[in-house]
Amino acid sequence: MEVIAFPMGNSPNRLYSALAPTLSSAPLSQHIPAKLDQEQDLDPADPVELLRECEEVLRTRPARLHRAFVCQNGSGDHRQQPIRVMQWNILAQALGEGMDSFVRCPLEALKWNERKYLILEEILTYQPDILCLQEVDHYFDTFRPVLSRLGYHSSFCPKPWSACLDVANNNGPDGCALFFRHKRFQLLGTTHLQLAAKMLETNQVAIVSTLRCRATGRALCVAVTHLKARSGWERLRSAQGSDLLRNLQNITQEAGRAAAAAPGEGEPGVGMGVPLLVCGDFNAEPSEDVYCRFATSSLGLDSAYKRLSSDGQTEPPYTTWKIRPSGESCHTLDYIWYSHQHLNVDTVLDFPTAEQIGPDRLPSYNYPSDHLSLVCDFSFCDSPE
């Protein structure tokens, strides 16, 4: 199959103009302190025009996977505008081309000059209000400038010892990124975490942002994380999850006290912290201890994608599906956890079938990552009396 590449520098189109600005304040291989992670002053962009541009660049590629939203029977306030949340491990470019060995994926399909358009096309298609990404190694030169022009504010936390740095011609370390629409939310605070296990810092990170919904005045904590990969590391993942839960308990309680003390603001909930969303690639099947810790946490979390099952208790059969030299790997590793006492799940984006994904699995010419994106619409439950 012949694929025609469209390098971004060949024409002064709108998306290229959005990608052109880059940071010169520090090398990408260095950790960027949160205080430097501020929005760029860029002209607004039209998401419809950018989506059309992505489609034009990708016109020679096969049609993208069709996915439908499944409506849920919620009891939320339908007068609210739903909050759309997107969770996605987008596959770090350095890892995709240099380390991950997707033996059934043509190397040409992984080239950044087109793969970035596939990623942006998916984000533009679903237009999330909150976007949580893992394996981001093109934050400063791609996602931050483009999404900033679309009205998103964001934060990026790189891994301290990213494997991307071991790949020649890398674009810096990969990490987690959290984006939110500034028109919908006011930022109250952001915390970057280096997750610990038995008091020892590990290579995995998390971002926790406290937001206030401008329409309802209600506070909301959002976290994004990426836990340790590979089998044999179950105990480390469990410890990292416990550390994250401890931090989330403290952050939500503090945010709840601050919200309750603010005059005229929304009620966060009686005796509890603010509602919580936790998005991430946990690298853990539902049978692992870290999953059980989140499911039984005192934070009152439930997994949104269980809503796709007939009994509401079963996770999807896969969120990642790839073929490596060691064989085929089909697992459920990605989750959107939510405070079920304070948030309703209104809709959930269904997954493509095995036939739609195709025999060569992910990534491919028509899908940019080895992980499928998760997208849900949430609404606040009625305020307690």
Image (cartoon, rainbow, N blue to C red):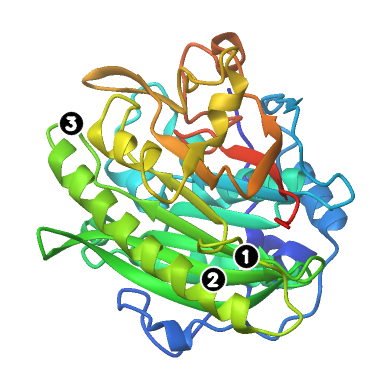
Estimate the x, y position of residue 185 in percent, counting from the top left: 71, 70
* Residue at the (53%, 60%) spot, across then down: 222
* Residue at the (61%, 30%) spot, across then down: 366
In the rendered image, the quadrant that contains the C terminus is bottom right
Residue 43 visible in the snapshot: yes
In the rendered image, the quadrant that contains the N terminus is top right
Residue indicated by mark 2: 256
Circle 1 Cα neighbour tier, 10 Å, few/some/many (<14 / 14–19 / ≥20): many
For the residue marked with disc 3, what is the amino acid? Ser
Task: Give 288 or 383, whichever is nearer the viewer.
Answer: 383
Residue indicated by mark 3: 231
Q: CA distance from mark 3 to mark 1?
A: 39 Å
* Residue at the (38%, 49%) spot, across then down: 298
For the residue marked with disc 1, what is the amino acid? Pro
Q: CA distance from mark 2 to mark 1?
A: 6 Å
Pointer 2 and pointer 1: residues touching (CB < 8 Å)? yes
**Res 307 → quadrant:** top right
Residue indicated by mark 1: 268
Left or right of 280 in this view: 130? right
Task: Give 141 or 371, whichever is nearer the viewer.
Answer: 371
Left or right of 338 in this view: 107? left
Whichever of callouts 3 and 1 sits on the residue coming sooner in the sequence is: 3
